[in-house]
Amino acid sequence: MKDMTDIPAVMTEIGRRAKAAAAELAFTPPARKTEALEAAADAVWARRAEIVEANAQDLAFGRDKGLTEAMMDRLLLTEDRIRGIVEGLRAIAAQEDPVGKVIAEWDRPTGLHIQRVRTPLGVVGVIYESRPNVTADAGALCLKSGNAVILRGGSESFHSSRAIHDCLVSGLRKAGLPEDAIQLVPTRDRAAVSELLQMTDYVDVIVPRGGKGLVGLVQREARVPVFAHLEGIVHIYIDASADPVKALTVVMNAKTRRTGICGAAECLLIHRDAVDTIGQGVVRALIEAGVEVRADETLQAIEGTHQASADDWGREYLDSIIAARVVEDEDAAIEHIRTYGSNHTDCILAEDPAAIERFVERVDSAIVMINASTQFADGGEFGMGAEIGIATGKMHARGPVGAEQLTSFKYVVRADGAVRA
């Protein structure tokens, strides 16, 4: 590796090596990728004490930097969370390999047999903030899908990410795969991000995973195509037909289970006809659980609420805060989501099939949920083993981005000497 003060040279070398590794991974047998991921999982668990020790350094750095409690929670690695990383690696290892899968095939009268076949994207650049588990998730998903990956973790998770990355590399080594298949940018210098965004000769797609500031920077500066993982401005609409017990249970879980993840509910919309019944109960329960409820004029009649400002609509708190307002009907709720949402995840709590169908048809978010906690907005919960992010755009990949979404396709055309008239 070149002198770390010469960031352009360092990143060019990383890119060159990633591209060479990607060429080999494109035809690597599924069994060897599985072997590498299983070995990486074993290494993570065997070295969990080292990972916790590295994480302690990051937590100290985060405290000195003044990170919020929610951000510190995103950064924290416990033995249980490390177990979750291990389970995620094994789940990805056990999945069907997407590379080479025939998506569709058909015959033409001209004698052509045409197949659309999944292929790797090539080299994926992943830029993420404080959650160190993304190192494992992104590295594993890219390997499973036959892609090389360049990981640039946040400065807060620098030591944790390095420890986890070492385990991934040991898995590659054990399976006889190129160690350059999963590379971690070895510096906190922000100049490395700018370089990565311009590396069109080496990188095929960028996946940013973080807050609005990070995603906005990537979208502004990237010359490489981007799968945007935008903010999770997650809404829950309580319809007049909602079941009171389901509504209370789902809203409490969606907001309070973990406030610092992108699937946490950030805005509660309550049908006017449900305000004096379900709405009152849900708002009071949130307050009793320590959640700050920033309410509109109607809901401010409930003791303990705070007055909402215009800035509270369309805001991602990632904290024990939720905005809440009354809407006249379902269409008003849908309009609010269209105006203030981020196309990430939105939910309806209802028993009326017509109301549910209308919401599903008209809310154009990557994930639309019905009577389910929005904290299920996660690739692992979708059966993908893990995710590299939640894509909120509309091109190629949308929603949780797993191994299959990290592939493109090519057409394979077979014939027996066919010529065109």
Image (cartoon, grey):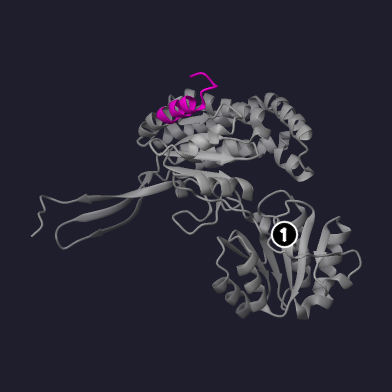
Q: In this view, does 85 lie to the left or right of 29?
A: right
Q: Is residue 257 visible?
A: yes
Q: Main secondary structure of the magenta part?
A: helix
SS at badge 1: strand
Q: Position of residue 43 (x, y in %)?
A: 59, 26
Q: Residue furthest right?
A: 303
Examine the rendered structure and indicate whether residue 74 appears above or below residue 8: below
Q: Bounds of the magenta span? A: 1-16
Residue 370 in view here = no
Residue at (22% x, 51% y) in the render: 413
Q: Which amino acid does label 1 sit on?
A: Glu
Q: In this view, does 160 lie above or below 91?
A: above
State the image coordinates of residue 389 (x, y, percent, origin top left). 56, 48
Name the residue beneath numbered marker 1.
266
Q: x, y (%) of residue 421? A: 8, 60
The quadrant holding residue 306 is: bottom right
Tell which of 168 and 101 is nearer to you.
168
- Relative depth, front residue between 60 and 190: 190
